[in-house]
Amino acid sequence: MRIKKTGCLLLVLVLAALMMLAWLWWRQRRQELSFVRYEEFGIDMPVSYSVHGIDVSKFQQQINWEAVKQMQVANIRISFAFIKATEGITRQDAAFRRNWRKAKQAGLVRGAYHFFYATRDPVKQAINFRNMVELESGDLPPVLDIEMHNNQPAAVIRSTAKIWLEEMEKAYGVKPIIYTNLRFYNTYLGDEFREYPLWIAHYYQKKRPRIDREWVFWQHSDIGRVNGIKTIVDFNVFRGDSAALMKLCLP
């Protein structure tokens, strides 16, 4: 009887060890496959993230938003879209109003962004955005797209950007999102802007962008393809699930 019990115990231990080895193999394999090439999207997609999106402007021409929403490859589909609204103190994206309306009708979570110049009055830039964008419950916070230094020192860039961000927070009651690339953030923004949600552009990286702070969105490619859009388009992921995405939106 004791021999039988010992044999059963050994069998259990062997099975447990095999299961552990199988789990380790699966985990390693999943890490290796953190990017998977899907020809339909034309790029390597970071499959370890569950919420995917795009960002667009007039350069994507007329978009069929229903086709964007309906496209699904494996378990990947487009859930959100950032849409260019304004630039500087006077420019307004010609396709914004249509994109803004149609994206919501298609059932996508939408966000609007402003292309910022440190050489222009930040208050007037904020007025330009407010005149163009009416955010509603379920929309993402306003986005400051800041990626050009225009030969301005870091101190000027930081001070003007803060004015725009503060104006947006007063207008919409939420902390705006900052969009920029890795080099610009480290050179011109840095620790003074850690309180703001970050949307970081860092292309062709495996698993995550290489930045030493928390981020919420990652623009991982600028050459993607999606049904309903004739041109190439930027692809993004959200760092969280769909419930966390909705929590970030305006109440």
Image (spheres, helix red, strand yellow):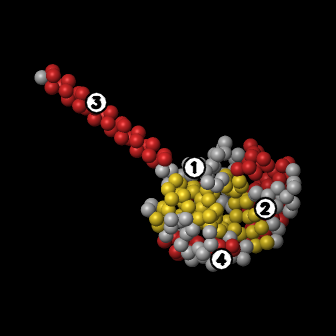
SS at mark 2?
loop
Residue at horizontal 79%, vertical 49%?
188
Within 10 Å of disc 4 (Cα), the crowding (few <14, some 14-19, many 20+) is some
Task: Determine the image quadrant of residue 121.
Answer: bottom right
Q: On the image, numbered disc 2 is attached to which residue?
A: 116
Amino acid at circle 1:
Lys
Residue at horizontal 50%, vertical 65%?
39
**Residue closest to the far top:** 2
SS at mark 3?
helix
Of callouts 2 and 1, the N-terminal one: 2
Within 10 Å of disc 3 (Cα), the crowding (few <14, some 14-19, many 20+) is few
Q: On the image, numbered disc 1 is attached to which residue?
A: 206
Residue 82 point in image, percent of width and height: 64, 65
Of callouts 3 and 1, the N-terminal one: 3
* C-alpha span from label 2 to label 1: 29 Å
Residue at horizontal 82%, vertical 68%?
89
Amino acid at circle 4:
Gln
On-image quarter of the C terminus: bottom right
SS at mark 4?
loop
Residue 13 tag number: 3
